[in-house]
Image: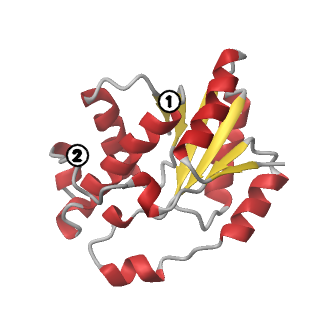
Amino acid sequence: MTQIYRSISALQSALQRQRTKGSRIGVVPTMGALHDGHLSLVKAAQKDCDFVIVTIFVYPTQFNNAQDLTTYPRSEEADLALLNDLHVDAAFLPDVEEIYPNGHSTKISLDGPAQRLEGEMRPKHFDGVATVVAKLFSITQAERSYFGEKDWQQLQVIKTVVKALNLPFKVIG
């Protein structure tokens, strides 16, 4: 049964127990509405890691248009059923206030791969992606993180952030 965590402190306590056991921890960050692509990332993480966390967090900093945020699909019950079927160890489903307790006052600002292609059409989009992913990495401190290659530019942005901030994570595409 997938353990569900909604608070950072509860998740971090569980992860500390896993680290004490010597478990290799992997994280699959998502915004929910899980599909086969997400599930393939989960399966890859399960092959490589002893303990897998799937994050489900629709983060407002990704959206330039408030309407897109409100209409983004949310299917928590169906997502958790899929994770249970795969015997995922943990699901982290925080609310916005848990991740951004004081609003959005701190953020990562990007250049490089974030300024071209999608970045030209959606200014500051990748700043939001980079900020929330860095926060999730800080919260989970997983050794490995898994991202789809379908969104190639996002994967490049995340790899750039990990390298630039000297984060001790392996990003698996």
In the rendered image of this protein, does residue 146 appear above or below residue 124? above
Residue at x 62%, y 42% (from the top left corner): 10
Q: Residues within 10 Å of mark 2 (few under 14, many from 20)?
A: some
Percent of width and height locating residue 160: 29, 36
- Looking at the rendered structure, the number of numbered marks drawn on it comes to 2
Residue at x 57%, y 45% (from the top left corner): 28
Percent of width and height locating residue 153: 34, 51
Q: Nearer the viewer, residue 53 or 99?
A: 99
Q: Which residue is mark 2?
A: 108
Residue at x 30%, y 27% (from the top left corner): 163
Which sits earlier in the primary sequence, circle 2 or circle 1?
2
Q: Residues within 10 Å of mark 1 (few under 14, many from 20)?
A: many
Image position of 35 (left or right of 29): right
Q: Nearer the viewer, residue 136 or 20?
A: 20
Q: Is residue 75 visible?
A: yes
Q: Which residue is mark 1?
A: 141
In the rendered image of this protein, does residue 76 appear above or below residue 10? below
- Say what amino acid the circle numbered 1 marks: Gln
Q: Which mark is residue 127?
A: none
Q: Is residue 153 visible?
A: no
